Image: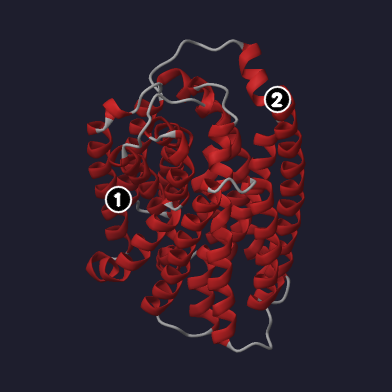
Amino acid sequence: MDTVHQTTHWPAVLAALGAGVVTGAAISKMSPALPLLQSEFGLSLIATGWLVSTFNTIALGSAIFFGLICDRAGALRFCLRGLACVIAGGLLGVFAPSAGWIIVSRVIEGAGYVAVLVSAPGLIAAASAPMQRGLAFGFWGAHMPIGGVAVLLASPVLFALSGWRAVWTGVAALGALVMVFLALQSRHYTGVHAGAPRSLASIRASLAQPVPWLLGVVFGAYTLQFYAIMMWLPTYLLQTRDTGATASALLTALFVLINAFGNMTGGWFMHRNVPRGRIIAVTFAVTTLAFIGIFADGLPDAARFACVLAYGFVTGNIPPAVLSGGVRYARSPSEAGSIQGLIVQISNVGIFAGPPLIAAAVTHGGGWGAALWVILGAAAVGFGAAIAIARLETRDFARMARRE
């Protein structure tokens, strides 16, 4: 996807990143609040897993459709509407009298989450120079961990004020601030305005490319692993290590913060033109070893947590490689939303299925160690998709070289 910018307008990139940070905070706020929600509403471990996954219901079923709407409405307008949904859903959750209303509010927030995820990458590409796009997407890849760290660090203080509802209110307020900042940067997002309706043949051609599908599979494997750790780590620490709520939140925040630094490293690799298939394959291979250490009962707790941090850093390479690939395979700015929607929809299988699968494995498999098999299965799928991406991109580069 081409852009007219020869220099990157970093405030505009930061504004789009801020929209992603809001969605990261919205999805991550459930993690430290799970014990409180379980206590207040009397939820079982499996029911809590489904409560986590409802956030991703919209993405799982209709992200491609959202991407097509984004292409038609324009990325900036769609991103602003997505933030509005995150705010509205969060405020509904503040006043929720039951777990059922929490689920409804999470579905609304989930719609906003999808809208931002399919639109913000196009804004970043529009505001960045081609030679700096890899770095820009390194920052974008960190939107989820940045939002997660913010909410995990703030949650102990906010819990003391008025429980989990204070966290919901804080995320909604952050969303309102980012909406204003994003709107003020509108002139820097060139080529992402409302477009003409696309023909069925054009849609079919853009979605027929194999690499975006494989990138979605990779991201699905990544999200299953990452959110399995992020969502269940506080609960695991509370139930098996008797750490307090504050200590559990801080340890989880450290894991997420390390992941943000890994995202920057992944952006640097993309900036240095390291093939994305190679980045992804090596990442899954290394993180598999880290997971074996995490679930090794014979290791002391300090060593196992070191493996958690090692996993968090290394796996951070994947989001920049995947999300920049979505823009790379859009043949024009008007197709960016649909390609991102495809990747988001496939990837959300991991976010949707991960927490319940982990909960079921722990409940019926004899303890937390049973979760390892779910995670290793995801790693095998991701590694296989990465090898296929590497082969396809090598073939594409060879074709381009012959044409030159």
Residue at (35%, 61%) from the top-left corner? Answer: 151
Frontmost residue, 218 versus 93 = 218
Q: Are marks 1 and 2 in contact (CB under 8 Å)?
A: no
Instruction: List x then y, in percent, for residue 223.
Output: 58, 53
Q: Is residue 37 above or below residue 62?
A: below
Res. 37 in view: no
Q: Residue at x 71, y 58 (%)?
A: 379
| Residue at mark 2 | 208
Please, what secondary structure does the residue beneath circle 2 have?
Answer: loop
> Residue 399 vs residue 344: left or right?
right
Please, which residue is most extreme toward the front here? 404
Q: Quadrant of residue 398?
A: top right
Give the amino acid type for the residue marked by disc 1 in the picture. Answer: Phe
Q: Amino acid at mark 2?
A: Ala
Task: Assess disc 2: are there few (<14), some (14-19) or many (≥20) residues with their C-alpha within 10 Å of its C-alpha.
Answer: few
Quarter the C terminus occupies: top right
* Residue at 27% over, 49% down: 174
Residue 281 lies, in percent from the top left, at 70, 54
Kindly identify the residue that appears in the image at 73 percent across and 44 percent down.
Answer: 390
Residue 400 lies, in percent from the top left, at 69, 27
Is 373 above or below relative to 206? below
- The residue that mark 1 highlights is 95
Give the side of residue 180 with respect to residue 369, left or right: left
Tag count in the figure?
2
**Percent x, y of residue 376:** 73, 63
